[in-house]
Amino acid sequence: MSSTNETSDTTKPRQVRVAEGHWKAYDRVCKQLDTNRAEHLNAYIRATIAEHGDAEALKLLAEADAEVAERRARMHPGRPPKTPPAA
């Protein structure tokens, strides 16, 4: 549970406005990088918070990372846990 008193067992879809051509090109680039848009965007978000976040942002990042790790462990028994990319 995060410090915002929200409870969740899933990540939530977020709406962002992106030009169709950008989204398609981004998909192609992510495939070349052997990733997908969601993984790439999440890695970018984590890195940005780690680099520029204040103490509260870093605390929220740690809580979110723990939540994701716990959920992945529940959903994929036997699968090695994903570790967040180094900041």
Image (tube, rainbow, N blue to C red):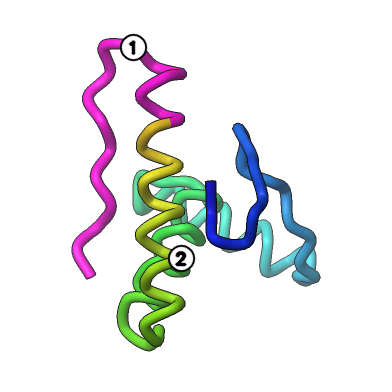
Residue at (75%, 70%) from the top-left corner?
18
Queried whether the magenta region covers residue 9, the answer comes back as no
The amino acid pointed to by label 2 is Leu
Callout 1 amino acid: Pro
Q: Nearer the viewer, residue 87 or 3?
A: 3
- Boundaries of the magenta span: 71-87
Disc 1: CA contacts within 10 A as few (<14), some (14-19) or many (>=20): few
Looking at the image, is 69 positioned above or below residue 19?
above
Q: Disc number at residue 54?
A: none
The residue that label 2 is drawn on is: 60
At horizontal 31% and vertical 83% (from top left) the residue drawn is: 51
Could you tell me which quadrant the C terminus lies in?
A: bottom left
Q: Which residue is at 73% across, 57% downward?
A: 14
Kindly identify the residue that appears in the image at 32 percent across and 76 percent down: 50
Q: Position of residue 15 (x, y in %)?
A: 79, 60
Q: Is residue 3 above or below residue 32?
A: below
Residue 61 position, x and y percent, is 41, 64
